[in-house]
Image (spheres, rainbow, N blue to C red):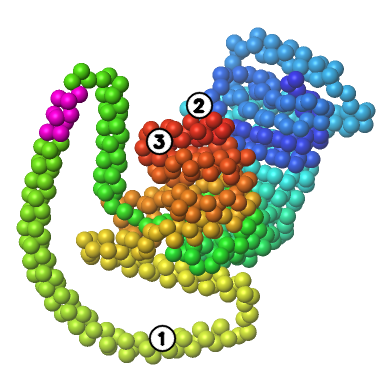
Amino acid sequence: PLPTVEALFKYAHHIRQLEFSGLIPPWYMSIGCKNLDFLKVIGERCEVPPQSTHAFFRAISAYTPTLRLDSVYFKPIRAECEDDDEDAEEEEEERGQGHAEGEEQQHEVSEGATQAGGDDAQGHKDAVNDNNDSDDTRDSETETIFAYLPEVPPEVTFSRLKTLYLFDLDGTDYDKQPWILEHAPRLEHLSWRGGYDFEFPTQSFTSALESGKLSRLESLELRGSHLEDSEIAQILSRMNRLVKLVAPRTKLGPLAMKQLFQHYETVRELDISGCENVRSWMIQMFLCKFASLEVFMADMLSLQDITTDPWVCSKLRKLSLDFELGYVDKEEGITEEEVEEESDDEEEKDVDTDQEGDEDPAEDETEASENVEEERDAATKEVEVTKVEEAITTEVDVEQTVVETAIAVELRVEEQQEEAASSIATLVEGTEIASDEDVEESQVEAEGLQYTPIEVAAAMAVAQWDQQQMEADAADAEAEENPDDLWKNLVPYVHSEARQRIIFERLGQLKYLEELNIKQQTERPYSAAEQLRAGVVQKVLDLRLENGMDLLSGLSRLREFYFPGPQEMEVREVMWIIEHWGGRLTYMTGELNRRRKVNDKLLRLLSEHHIAASKAIY
């Protein structure tokens, strides 16, 4: 049944879960829901037909299986007052009275609770009638004013609120949102999704943390917010305990990472996917230090970093991570795929000719042999011509490059000599000033400051991040000067089966893993080859038994598996998956084999064992 506003006021103190959606200010505060455990606020622009002010209040819909309202959902209706809608208003009033009578007949409460709720509702009903009689409601193209805009009553404190969702708060009354954070002393989880014109209230939030008003907060989600690294670090430094941090596509970096290390024993869920300042070695440090991790989502981990220290996060249930295995020339990959597609087409043609049959097989064989010989002769001639052309071009290029490099070396030597002569004088003057500054800094640092091992590790992480950043900047500068030599630094390590086994060994230790996503998360690698956005493709983890896939046999709890493609799986790999993961595995996505026929065959085999698999091509 749909309760009227009067009924909602009457039982407001019984409401435990509340969801609110709309543009108007948070007038749900004035209802008197003092015992909320769960509150979700979603700001969205509602396109609904014009209704009267009375219909606006009756737009409240609720699912009430028992007398204690477990979940209430508020949907605002755009209010308009027109003289022609009096009949519609009377019908809506009669309909609302019918709902109210049905609500009273269906549910019964104790006399004490009913009397208390009725006393609380009387004042709110008067406010409702006063607002209904006003003529302040109007609509325009740029502004919409709603009928019911009460102030927040002083008795509402949300003293039991534990979970708060604030989504897309465009157009809402911004001043009321920080008020909620300051009046929820038992809040444990805050989920924030910012709008286009409203950012996270960092200052009011940190002040509430410092004053102890949010001392129980341990879970934080920051989606769609353009928070800087320093702002995230400021928030994390004020939190007493941190269990969950979801901050995708933010500016999270070394400052926030330092504060995260203060909570390395308690963090169970961490989402840093899409964060441009997060490097591969930082991801490796999380996996090596945060033993309580159960959910971890990041972008890319280099094979060079994964070989440093073992992982300690054996409790992981969900892992989303991409492995950087090196890069190959995109043109080579395309030619290989084209050759394989042509071979598949030739196989299909052979099958069709076999099914149709030929009347003169001897003649067909002789013609086919002659065609093959002609094609070979033509191919050899083309190869010889291309070799001659390449030899000529290389000789010209070599001579030209030798001359250019000689001139460039002479110019660079002259520039270096001039710079050295000018910098000697400045160094002599700067050493005296720098020495005085160093003495002052050393005196400040020697005043008895003590650092914990965690702070030392975080400081080392920051220094390592700075070093990595300097190397990346140097690589960018070198790439701009010598664009032709980029290919030499493109593959900094060897893509071999032995190194792939290290990845399989790390993943095989995660016995509690239920969801594994190792597909390519981003096209922008976090390595020295970051500037090579064109002309290369990333190598993928080869999921074959001879490369070490059998080391994943311990993942018996795996339910979902997302892998990059195209792969080179055969029937034995799929049968191995069915044997070791088939007990719980329900879904996997990726291209099992680049050959279309083989891929379809493997998909059918999985389907026969009740494993849903998509044939998505990456």
Specify start and end residues of the magenta stretch as a single range: 361-371
Residue 434: which numbered mark, if any? 1
Amino acid type, residue under disc 3 in the picture: Val
Residue 140: which numbered mark, if any? 2
The residue at 39%/59% (across/down) is 496
Please state if 29 lies on the left or on the right of 371 as rendered: right
Q: N-terminal of the two: label 3 or label 1?
A: 1
Q: Is residue 65 magenta?
A: no
Please state if 453 lies on the left or on the right of 298 as rendered: right
Q: Quadrant of the N terminus?
A: top right
Mark 2 against mark 1, which lies toward the viewer?
Answer: 1
Please state if 376 lies on the left or on the right of 505 as rendered: left
Q: Is residue 341 visible?
A: yes
- On the image, the x and y values in percent for residue 99 come to 76, 17
Mark 3 against mark 1, which lies toward the viewer?
Answer: 3
Q: Residue furthest right?
A: 111
The secondary element bearing badge 3 is classed as helix
> Would you name the residue on which mark 3 appears?
598
- On the image, the x and y values in percent for residue 229 come to 51, 60
Amino acid type, residue under disc 1 in the picture: Ala
